[in-house]
Image: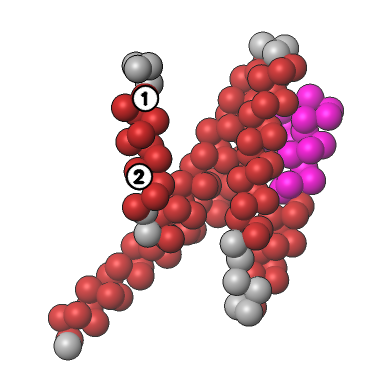
Amino acid sequence: MSINQPFQTYKQNSVNTAPPGELTLMLYNGCLKFIKRGKLAIQEKDIEQRNLNLLKAQNIIQELMVTLNMDVEISKNLIQLYDYLYRRLIEANTKNSIEILDEVEDFVTQFRDTWKQAMINAKKASAAESVLV
């Protein structure tokens, strides 16, 4: 048994048991992690790691796109923004551009922070409703 096996099992269980809001937060955090790794790989001139990590970031953006509920108005705006980020990640990978990754990282950080605040607000609203009932 590999030393990483218990950690991988723990991570998988965390994903499998997380509520949907937490999963979205995990996706944003994962995307940021892979962007940072991609930037480091560019600095180290490691083409293979750059490509690997930026592909993972692209896959996460795609996952965020396919999980949008298109019946909700804001999703129509989000899908356009996600599509833009996806294309910029491809461009950063092909052009070896830390500057483009900085731009994408800023957007994803804003999405993540906004999502985190929305989760906090939803919990507060839910707690307030349960007190009133």
Camera-nearest residue between 117 and 45:
45
Q: Which residue is mark 1?
A: 5
Residue at image point 79% right, 24% down: 96
- In magenta, the rendered stretch is 85-101
Which type of secondary structure does the marked residue at label 1 adopt?
helix
Q: Amino acid at mark 2?
A: Ser
Residue 5 percent coordinates (x, y): 36, 24
Quarter holding the C terminus?
Answer: bottom left
Whether residue 97 is situated above or below residue 130 in the rendered picture? above
Q: Is residue 133 above or below residue 115?
A: below
In the rendered image, residue 99 lying in the magenta stretch gets the answer yes
| In the image, residue 25 above or below residue 30 | below
Q: Nearer the viewer, mark 2 or mark 1?
A: 1
Q: Mark 1 belongs to which amino acid? A: Gln
Number of other residues with Cα within 10 Å of mark 1, as a class: few under 14, some 14 to 19, many 20 or more: few
Residue at (38%, 37%) from the top-left corner?
11
